[in-house]
Amino acid sequence: MPEIGRVLILIGGLIVLVGVVFVAGWRIPFLGRLPGDFSYERGNFHVYFPLATGIVLSVVLTLVLNLFFRGR
């Protein structure tokens, strides 16, 4: 049963982390404006595809989670 408690604490921490990223993410100047982020606009139609931002966030989260779970 203690394993369920640890999993719930981990999920809660991840939810808090995602919330902080949503709140502070708008204040990070380069996030969403990297050279590999594509934007297409024509009239009232606008498509934004943050490819480079997604790759950077994926690498950072992979490193953080590997450091966190490496101790087990």
Image (cartoon, rainbow, N blue to C red):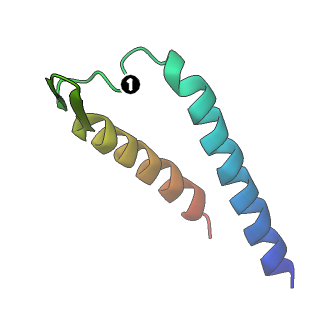
Q: Relative to residue 14, is residue 54 depicted above or below?
A: above
In-front residue for pair 19/57: 19
What element does badge 1 sit on? loop
In-front residue for pair 42/4: 42
From the viewer's perspective, tell me whether residue 52 is left or right of residue 24: left
The residue at 73%/70% (across/down) is 7
Image quadrant occupied by the C terminus: bottom right
The total number of labels drawn is 1
In-front residue for pair 33/45: 45
Image quadrant occupied by the N terminus: bottom right
Residue 24 point in image, percent of width and height: 59, 24
The residue at 65%/39% (across/down) is 19
Q: Relative to residue 69, is residue 57 depicted above or below?
A: above
Residue 60 point in image, percent of width and height: 42, 43
The residue at 47%/18% (across/down) is 28
Pick out the residue farthest to the bottom.
Answer: 1
From the viewer's perspective, tell me whether residue 61 is left or right of residue 40: right
Category of crowding for the residue at label 1, using alpha-carbon neighbours closer than 10 angstroms: few (below 14), some (14–19), many (at least 20): some
Q: Relative to residue 56, is residue 15 depicted above or below?
A: below
From the viewer's perspective, tell me whether residue 37 is left or right of residue 18: left
Give amino acid for label 1: Leu
Residue 62 point in image, percent of width and height: 42, 53
Q: Relative to residue 51, is residue 64 depicted above or below?
A: below
Q: Quadrant of residue 69?
A: bottom right
Residue on which disc 1 sits: 31
The residue at 48%/58% (across/down) is 66
